[in-house]
Image: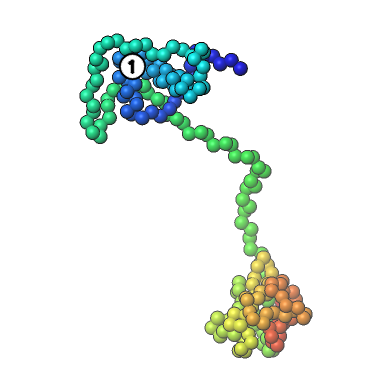
């Protein structure tokens, strides 16, 4: 592929202030534009490192005229020179890539009305207790339980009857001895009419009647 050595394209780069002041003075002394001088310096560096061939390159800088260049006094410490510099347009941040399209998000569902639950009773030691709370606690603690069972084998908060979506569930609250239903230990189960559960040796019978 042939490269057009005369083609020019606008570039943007960062330059140290001291180097820029140097090129400004050289521009005045050689009566050439700063971009010409920067290109010449880059060309010389490319030749020195073997990336440009002398036969294909442009001639170097002419010999400066025999006169003393007028060097402006250096600016005070901490103050930059007020010499005019070519304005460099600010870089714009790259736009983020478009987010991948997925299936449309369904609109939020309207709040569903709570399904009313029928009254539930638990029969313990021939006494009938109404489950009238969202969370009905069964355990050893007299103050923390809605149905207290005074036995060391029963945990302080052993189980709970939870009302949810129009039904009732019995849930183990991390007890030591668990909940037994038909010979199997259960952790969370929907309560149906006539169900009998055991907490250790204590029978709990549930009815909706």
Q: Is residue 7 visible?
A: no
Q: Position of residue 128 (x, y in %)?
A: 67, 84
Q: Which quadrant: the N terminus?
A: top right
Query: In which image quadrant can residue 175 be found?
Result: bottom right
What residue is rendered at 37% in x and 18% in y? Answer: 34
Residue 92 higher or lower than 204, as above or below? above
What residue is rendered at 23% in x and 21% in y? Answer: 72
Q: How is the image coloured?
A: rainbow
Q: Which quadrant: the C terminus?
A: bottom right
Q: Position of residue 39 (x, y in %)?
A: 43, 19
What residue is rendered at 59% in x and 15% in y? Answer: 2
Q: Is residue 67 visible?
A: yes
Q: Nearer the viewer, residue 102 or 42?
A: 42
Query: In which image quadrant can residue 136 be found?
Result: bottom right
Q: Position of residue 79 (x, y in %)?
A: 25, 32
Q: Is 208 displayed left or right of 49 in the figure?
A: right
Q: Is 152 displayed left or right of 76 in the figure?
A: right
Count of labels shown? 1
Extreme residue in the right direction: 182
Residue at the disc numbered 1? 27
Residue 125 higher or lower than 10, as above or below? below
Residue 185 higher or lower than 96, as above or below? below
Q: Nearer the viewer, residue 145 or 172?
A: 172
Q: Is 196 displayed left or right of 63 in the figure?
A: right
Q: Position of residue 205 (x, y in %)?
A: 72, 82
What residue is rendered at 32% in x and 20% in y? Answer: 24
Q: Nearer the viewer, residue 105 or 39?
A: 39
Circle 1 residues within 10 Å: few <14, some 14–19, many ≥20: some
Q: Secondary structure at mark 1?
A: helix
Query: In which image quadrant can residue 168 be found?
Result: bottom right
């Amino acid at each position: 592929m042939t490269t057009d050595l005369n083609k020019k394209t606008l570039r943007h780069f960062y330059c140290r202030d001291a180097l820029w002041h140097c090129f400004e003075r050289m521009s005045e002394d050689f009566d050439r534009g700063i971009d010409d001088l920067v290109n010449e310096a880059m060309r010389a560096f490319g030749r020195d490192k073997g990336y440009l061939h002398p036969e294909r390159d442009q001639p170097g800088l002419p010999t400066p005229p025999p006169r003393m260049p007028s060097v402006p006094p250096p600016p005070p410490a901490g103050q930059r020179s007020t010499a005019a510099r070519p304005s460099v347009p600010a870089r714009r941040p790259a736009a983020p890539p478009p987010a991948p399209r997925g299936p449309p998000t369904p609109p939020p569902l309207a709040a569903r009305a709570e399904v009313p639950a029928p009254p539930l009773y638990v029969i313990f030691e021939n006494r009938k207790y109404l489950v009238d709370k969202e969370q009905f606690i069964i355990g050893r603690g007299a103050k923390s339980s809605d149905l207290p069972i005074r036995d060391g084998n029963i945990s302080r908060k052993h189980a709970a009857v939870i009302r949810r979506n129009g039904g009732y569930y019995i849930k183990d609250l991390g007890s030591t001895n668990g909940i037994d239903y038909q010979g199997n230990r259960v952790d969370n189960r929907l309560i149906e009419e006539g169900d009998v559960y055991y907490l250790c040796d204590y029978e709990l019978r549930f009815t909706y009647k």
